[in-house]
Image (cartoon, rainbow, N blue to C red):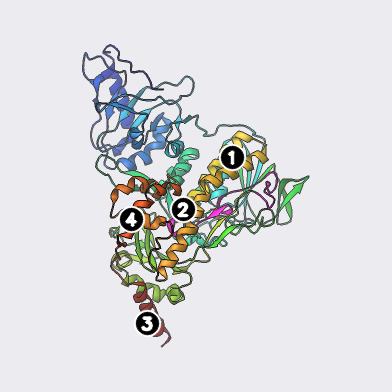
């Protein structure tokens, strides 16, 4: 169905209306505007019959950042973002290059479209609508769904009490989202939270001080349920990670550059401030059960009663090993060493080849730079876990020597650009694991106990998908609880199905791709008797950029790994022709081993 095109007689009030709307938007965009706003389109032409829609043009220095940073205040005034890619949806009817009609989104009762701000060559497209544009639904399904905003709204079951085990990203997000719907939530973590001075040791979460990149799905999840957390992250110095402008396509936000420390500190503060959330420090030792259902948790010997228990206790998930069937997967085969740095005053960023920083892949190891908040960044060397000859990278002198030898790391960590702010940090075991909601008999593990986040799925962190898959789950779980209310069995079953369809494919992608990567890192060539793995398909876009149409959405996690099947034959053809990804400048794996060995020898001499 498309909205009929209504051309109406010219209205002398249109220019005045345009001035009013321009003044309103100017107030909201403030210093981001580089020029005066201009009334354009047919309503700007005196005496011309037109569609009764006022078009305004606004130019900004950095359209993607402008939209992200101002969208909370824009949304409060009922201006909502229509991502530019929606303009290319098939339901847009474009006749002779002129948009003639569009499918109207379903609006809240009584809402009406009051005007829109059309995208000039270098800005985002905003449309004024009653109701909130649910951006993640748009991104994933290509549909436009409008939902009433949930800010502070009570959606049902307001008397439900939920105990959330674990106050990491999944637990905090779930707690805030449930409390915003009027539920009472107790989130329990063995970690007491940051010290008064803002430092945070965070024992028990090994990855806390390792580099993190937060993907688009994390941004979407925050903006959909708790936009103020996004604003607070930006205020705390986090930066939107943006793709640069392309011809015909303005740059857009694809994630967040931020230390995990800052991300969790802001999320935790939001949970502390959220009415309905109680944060408690303690160790959850057991799930309390009565008549085959969860009725709370045992924390340091005391029972905390609850109607629902959400286990967001992370990847170790010691607590609930007995309830569910065993996890699939295991060690991902990669080992990590990282260190955090800060740019010196006035020093510019080093080289970048990705929105989050710089990724360089050598046959035998990865060297990655993650840009974080407040001029901080982290470097990372990832190797095969079995490559013991590189294990000494965990020693400071060895890591520093390797960083000087690898051009991308050398550029970022040069003493005239930055200084280290942490010790060299080796990573612990890194797993690809998946564990659904069901027990060995294929039934819901326990009525009223639902697992989410890393407790369901962990993936090789060098690709940075963990918080994305965790918050996607938390967001989905909260929606299913809205729908199923206290029917926790149905909710668990549906959540399990959803995770199997939307989360597990990322786990399977890693299991296959990581094993293939480790095989190649140990000296083997591309194996064309087997499906070409995702990393090689991505690399092959260098030869055939047309593949990016399919590969790009996969890289951004907007399309599931199965979507790559459409270009796998083309990638296979490229590798069959003998092409291999070019080896970047810098030490080969064997040269790195030599360097590491030499530094170790000189240390012990
Ligand atoms: C080295 C490394 C680097 C990573 N880098 C990235 C990245 O760049 N981008 C990305 O998106 N993801 C990354 N990840 C993944 C990401 O860190 C996880 O997906 C994320 O932490 C999952 O959040 P969670 O809340 O489910 O679990 P966690 O963060 O592990 O939180 C679980 C919480 O539960 C608490 N807890 C556990 N058991 C109990 C108990 N019995 N009683 C009380 N409290 C308990 C713990 O103290 C912890 O606070 C990385 C992971 C690793 C290992």
What SS does tag 2 mark? loop
How far apart marks 4 and 2 lie (CA) works out to: 29 Å
User: Which residue appears farthest toward the left when viewing the image?
Assistant: 46
Q: Nearer the viewer, mark 1 or mark 3?
A: 3
The percent coordinates of residue 164 (x first, y second) are 63, 48
Q: CA distance from mark 3 to mark 4?
A: 42 Å
Marks 4 & 1, CB-CB < 8 Å contact: no
Residue 465 tag number: 2
The reply to whether the residue tagged 2 has its Cβ within 8 angstroms of ligand 1 is yes
Is residue 282 shown above or below 252? below
Q: Is residue 585 left or right of residue 437?
A: left
Query: As displayed, is residue 374 above or below residue 32?
Result: below
Mark number displayed over residue 178:
1
Q: Quadrant of residue 420?
A: bottom left
Residue at x 68%, y 47% (from the top left corner): 443
Which is closer to the viewer, label 3 or label 4? 4
Q: Residues within 10 Å of mark 3 (few under 14, many from 20)?
A: few
Tell me what residue is drawn at x 52 percent, y 33 percent.
Answer: 150
Q: Earlier in the sequence, mark 1 or mark 3?
A: 1
Question: Which is nearer the N-term, disc 3 or disc 2?
Answer: 2
User: Which tag is nearer the camera, tag 4 or tag 2?
Assistant: 4
Residues in magenta, as a range: 438-465
Q: Is residue 446 magenta?
A: yes
The secondary element bearing badge 3 is classed as helix
Residue at numbered disc 4: 573
Asked if residue 587 is among those painted magenta in the image, a careful observer would answer no
Density class for disc 1 (Cα within 10 Å; few <14, some 14-19, many ≥20) is many
Residue 203 position within the rendered picture, expressed as x and y whole percent measured from the top left = 56, 62
Cα gap from disc 4 to disc 1, whole angstroms: 50 Å
Residue 395 visible in the shown view: no
Label disc, if present, on residue 598 of the rendered structure? 3
Does residue 568 lie above or below 53 as drawn?
A: below
């Amino acid at each position: 169905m498309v909205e009929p095109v209504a051309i109406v007689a010219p209205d002398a009030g249109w220019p005045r209306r345009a001035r009013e709307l321009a003044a309103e938007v100017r107030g909201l965009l403030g210093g981001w505007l580089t020029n005066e706003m201009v009334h354009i389109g047919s309503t700007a032409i005196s005496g011309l019959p037109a569609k009764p829609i006022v078009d305004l043009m606004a130019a900004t220095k950095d359209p993607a950042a402008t939209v992200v940073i101002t969208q909370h205040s824009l949304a409060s005034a009922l201006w909502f973002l229509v991502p530019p890619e929606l303009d290319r949806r098939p339901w847009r009817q474009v006749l002779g290059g002129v948009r003639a009609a569009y499918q109207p989104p379903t609006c809240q009762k009584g809402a009406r479209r009051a005007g829109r701000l059309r995208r000039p060559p270098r800005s985002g497209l905003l449309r004024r609508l009653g109701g909130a544009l649910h951006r993640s639904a748009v991104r994933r399904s290509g549909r436009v769904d409008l939902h009433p905003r949930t800010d502070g709204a009570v959606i049902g079951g307001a008397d439900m009490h939920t105990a959330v085990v674990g106050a990491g990203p999944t637990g905090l997000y779930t707690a805030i989202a449930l409390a915003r719907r009027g539920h009472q939530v107790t989130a329990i973590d063995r970690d007491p939270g940051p010290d008064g001075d803002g430092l945070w040791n965070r024992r028990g979460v090994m990855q806390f001080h390792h580099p993190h990149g937060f993907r688009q799905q994390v941004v979407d999840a925050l903006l959909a349920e708790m936009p103020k957390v996004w604003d607070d992250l930006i205020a705390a110095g986090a930066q939107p990670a943006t793709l640069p402008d392309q011809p015909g396509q303005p740059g857009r936000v694809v994630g967040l550059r931020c230390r995990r420390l800052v991300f969790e500190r802001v999320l935790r503060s939001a949970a502390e401030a959220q009415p309905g959330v109680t944060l408690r420090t303690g160790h959850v030792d057991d799930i309390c059960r009565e008549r085959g259902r969860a009725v709370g948790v045992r924390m340091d010997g005391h029972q905390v009663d609850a109607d629902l228990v959400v286990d967001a206790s992370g990847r170790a998930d010691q607590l609930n090993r007995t309830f569910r069937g065993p996890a699939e997967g295991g060690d991902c085969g990669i080992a990590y060493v990282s260190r955090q740095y800060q740019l010196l005053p006035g020093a510019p960023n080093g080289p970048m080849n990705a929105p989050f920083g710089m990724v360089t892949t050598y046959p035998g190891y990865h060297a990655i730079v993650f840009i974080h908040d407040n001029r901080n960044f982290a470097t990372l060397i990832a190797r095969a876990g079995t490559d013991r000859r590189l294990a000494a990278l965990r020693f400071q002198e060895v890591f520093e020597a390797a960083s000087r030898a690898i051009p991308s790391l050398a550029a970022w960590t040069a003493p005239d650009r930055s200084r280290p702010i942490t010790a060299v940090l080796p990573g612990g075991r890194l797993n690809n694991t998946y564990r659904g909601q069901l027990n060995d008999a294929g039934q819901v593990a326990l009525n009223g106990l639902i697992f989410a986040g890393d407790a369901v799925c962990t993936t090789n962190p060098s690709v940075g998908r963990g918080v994305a898959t965790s918050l996607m789950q938390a967001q989905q779980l909260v929606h299913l609880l809205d729908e199923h209310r206290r029917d926790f069995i149905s909710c668990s079953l549906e959540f399990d199905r959803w995770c199997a369809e939307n989360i597990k494919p990322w786990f399977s992608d890693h299991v296959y791709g990581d094993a293939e990567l480790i095989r190649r890192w140990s000296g083997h060539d591309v194996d064309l008797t087997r499906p070409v793995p995702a990393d090689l398909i991505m690399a092959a876009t260098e030869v055939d950029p047309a593949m990016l149409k399919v590969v790009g959405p996969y890289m951004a996690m907007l399309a599931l790994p199965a979507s790559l099947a459409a270009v796998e034959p083309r990638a296979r053809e490229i590798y069959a022709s003998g092409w291999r990804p070019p080896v970047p400048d810098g030490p080969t794996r064997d040269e790195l081993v030599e360097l590491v060995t030499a530094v170790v020898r000189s240390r012990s001499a």
